[in-house]
């Protein structure tokens, strides 16, 4: 498997083939805005980076950091420092891991389990980083006879290894979590929690300003400074994630539009199609 040079290309290939795809990226690729997609994502930082927003939680990024992002979790690389930000992004179709899981070994564990201490982030030590990159090399290297078997074998070894690391580092992540707290802006944390709890409501800027006794300009400024995105884009991303879940549960497009907080169907159709790549109706048909 040749690594992709675009995160979007890797995601598209992963979903199209219903398996997995690797992207090897540098800072010369513009980071995606707040986005959601139907695949798991493993995000490994080789160098550079600075700050990540996953759902409503902020994480600093350092070389050796590995992030586990579940399907439908909104995420966004909010800040990049002046260095080259080299990273590996592995997109995985969720049902693909289920094929190879057993009663004793759940390969989805690192995505489905979210301990408070661990969150989405795992910091690999030097030896673990070498092993991770060696598996990526093995996945990327095979050609010719037996290549698909060798590729799959390396991928499964990688997932077993990562789940072992995920479990082993649960306790040590407590100290890492404490280091993340200074990045949190207390007011923005409250705003994010309020938005998440009232996502089905209109959520106008005026309402948020009144709720937190802040001027609209100040509210927008601190939100953008802390998250790297606007309030409107964040709300839209959360609503699209909810709409996708509703459609998968069997709700109609109109019901999903209303229940996820959109008051205008045409705006819902446009926002959903732009974020997901297909219309709500086609999405619902594909998940039926």
Image (cartoon, grey):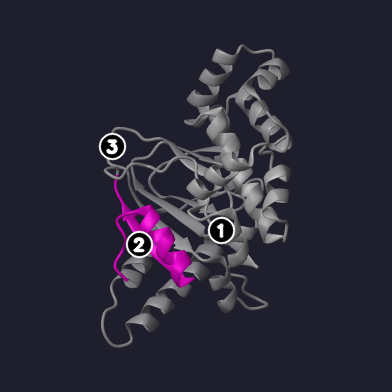
Query: Range of the magenta residues?
Result: 1-26
Foreground: 152 or 163? 152
Which residue, as the protein is rendered here, is positioned at the far front?
266
Q: Regarding mark 2 in the picture, which secondary structure is present there?
A: helix
User: Image quadrant of residue 198?
Assistant: top right
Tag shown at residue 215: none
The answer to whether residue 88 is seen in the rendering is no
Mark pair 3, 2: CA separation: 20 Å
Q: Is residue 106 above or below residue 254?
A: below
Picture coordinates of residue 6, whole percent (x, y): 33, 54
Residue matched to label 2: 133
Picture coordinates of residue 269, whole percent (x, y): 57, 46
Picture coordinates of residue 256, whole percent (x, y): 69, 49
Residue matched to label 3: 83
**Residue at figure coordinates x 51%, y 52% from the top left:** 276
Choose the circle earlier in sequence order: 3 or 2. 3
Q: Give the crowd class for mark 1: few <14, some 14-19, many >=20 residues within 10 Å.
A: many
Q: Quadrant of the C terminus?
A: bottom right
**Residue at figure coordinates x 36%, y 58% from the top left:** 9
Q: Is residue 261 left or right of residue 281?
A: right
């Amino acid at each position: 498997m040749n690594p992709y040079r675009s995160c979007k290309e890797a995601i598209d290939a992963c979903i199209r083939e219903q398996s997995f795809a690797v992207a090897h990226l540098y800072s010369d690729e513009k980071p995606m805005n707040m986005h959601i997609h139907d695949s798991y994502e493993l995000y490994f930082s080789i160098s550079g980076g600075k700050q990540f927003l996953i759902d409503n939680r902020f994480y600093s990024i350092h070389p050796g950091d590995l992030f586990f992002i579940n399907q439908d979790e909104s995420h966004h690389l909010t800040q990049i420092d002046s260095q080259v930000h080299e990273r590996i992004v592995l997109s995985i179709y969720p049902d693909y891991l289920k094929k190879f899981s057993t009663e004793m070994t759940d390969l989805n564990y690192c995505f489905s389990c979210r301990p408070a201490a661990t969150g989405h982030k795992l910091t690999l030590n030097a030896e673990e980083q070498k092993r991770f990159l060696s598996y990526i090399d093995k996945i990327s290297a095979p050609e010719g006879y037996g290549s698909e078997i060798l590729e799959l074998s390396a991928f499964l070894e990688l997932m077993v290894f990562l789940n072992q690391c995920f479990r082993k580092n649960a306790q040590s992540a407590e100290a890492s979590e404490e280091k993340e707290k200074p990045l949190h802006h207390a007011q923005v944390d409250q705003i994010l929690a309020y938005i998440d709890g009232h996502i089905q409501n209109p959520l106008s800027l005026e309402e948020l300003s009144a709720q937190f006794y802040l001027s609209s300009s100040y509210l927008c400024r601190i939100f953008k400074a802390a998250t790297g995105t606007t309030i409107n884009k964040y709300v839209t991303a959360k609503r699209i994630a909810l709409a996708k879940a509703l459609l998968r549960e069997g709700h109609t497009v109109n019901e999903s539009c209303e229940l996820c907080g959109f008051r205008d169907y045409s705006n819902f159709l446009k926002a959903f199609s732009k974020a997901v790549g297909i219309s709500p109706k086609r999405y619902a048909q594909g998940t039926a």
